[in-house]
Amino acid sequence: MVNKNKVAIIGLGYVGLPLAVAVAKKIHVIGFDINKRRISELNSGLDSTKELSENQVIESLGKTIKYTNSESHLENANFFIVTVPTPISKDKTPNLNPVINASKTVAKYLKKDSIVVFESTVYPGVTEDICVPILEKDSRLKYNDDFFVGYSPERINPGDKEHTVTKIKKVVSASSPKALEKISELYGSVITAGVYEAESIKVAEAAKVIENTQRDINIAFVNELSVIFEKMGIDTNQVLKAAGTKWNFLNFFPGLVGGHCIGVDPYYLAHKSQELGYNPEIILSGRKMNDNMPIHLVSRIIKKLLSNNNLLQTKTALILGATFKENCPDLRNSKVYDIFSELSDYNFKIEVHDPVADFNELTDLYESSATELIPKDRNYDVLIIAVSHNEFLSIDPESFINKNSVVFDVKGMFPEKPYLRL
């Protein structure tokens, strides 16, 4: 069955591209994305997400994969995998427009016995209650008679070169036993870690959304501990090391929670819960705790400056790292921007440097505060090592500060130094 398929992957970002390249090793793949710039860079052998090396992208260009932004190429597919993002709106409610638009696009090219698999993170019910009606209406085909649907949650960890797409067990689900068999066969042919067949599409959707919600809540817990222990004059990381000697202690650490997964997915589950009349207190409390950490961080900096008698005029600050996590170029929903905004309210003159992020994107976000090179021979009143990029391991923080400066080492990259940290 696998060799009879021509797979179209809709969306070539952090999730879609690695999957497309993996599947293309077995069968022909049409890699579709509406972003012309993205298609152009891929066809030139580049991947701005840095999930794949230049060699991997170049090797993918050939007879078994085609990168395109032309919908007409989807006419040749009979197996569609949707990997578009599912962000939140300004009011922190789900923004389903990308998955809705992808469904409308796929519907135009559905044919008898087509299968559509959604990988985008959603709350339980989106696939069957929102996407399927669009597919039926726009294709004029009948669900579970003419075409079939599945859900297989993405499990990509951006920047992680060890747990890559083929090495993570794939949860799969489908609208019929026959479709489930075909979906399992396709994924099983490329996912070396194997597949897990969920009982239903809603179970698979729920499994995905709670993975990141669980992490969000656990990080919120240790973030709250860090606030408490800071008031007690106790090093939170030393406490966690001691507690971690027990075999069943879960090792989570304080930090900034942003990005397009952990900082977003809980709002999807909370939204559906509230629609059903239940207010999810733990989930939303965790979100509130994590969203407030940038404010807490800046508050500690200001207090330290005051104790150093160093808040008498406009201050300078250097922020190292702007992406939402280490060794990843993605700036989306990064809490570093919240730190920048909070410091700006205190009239700081700020410079932001990130060697991993695309500098044009960094400039779009931070405007004149973005700096392409780490400044030299400068003493800043505040130095914030916000993201633990590998590139920062070789720097000497002392070269940026004076005796009255404040250094906040968010992730504890320099544990031997007496810097502030969460």
Image: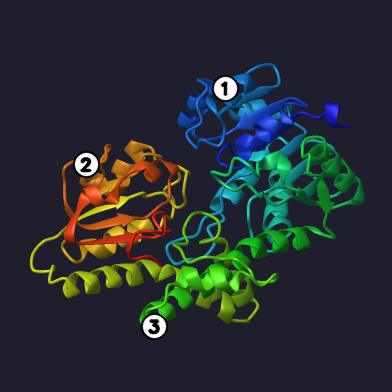
Numbered label tally: 3
Which is nearer the eye, 118 or 64?
A: 64
Characterize the local packing of mark 1: few (<14), some (14-19) or many (20 or more) Cα atoms within 10 angstroms.
Answer: few
In the image, residue 188 sits, relative to residue 281, either above or below, namely: above
Instruction: Tell us which disc is closer to us: 3 or 1.
Output: 3
Q: Give me the C-alpha separation between circle 3 and circle 1.
A: 51 Å
- Tell me which amino acid carries mark 2: Pro
Quadrant of the image occupied by residue 373: top left
Q: Which mark is residue 289?
A: none
Q: Position of residue 121 (x, y in %)?
A: 63, 55
* Residue beneath the point at 29% across and 68% down: 298
Q: Is residue 252 left or right of residue 233?
A: right
Q: Position of residue 291 (x, y in %)?
A: 43, 68
Q: Which mark is residue 375?
A: 2
Quadrant of the image occupied by residue 112: top right
Is residue 257 in sight in this rendering?
yes
Q: Give me the C-alpha separation between circle 1 and circle 2.
A: 32 Å
Compare marks 1 and 2 and give the one earlier in the sequence: 1
- Tell me which amino acid carries mark 1: Asn
Compare marks 3 and 2 and give the one earlier in the sequence: 3
Q: Is residue 5 left or right of residue 369?
A: right
Compare marks 3 and 1 and give the one earlier in the sequence: 1
In the image, residue 128 sits, relative to residue 238, either above or below, namely: above
The outermost residue toward the top is 63
The residue where tag 1 is placed is 55
Q: Position of residue 314 (x, y in %)?
A: 10, 61
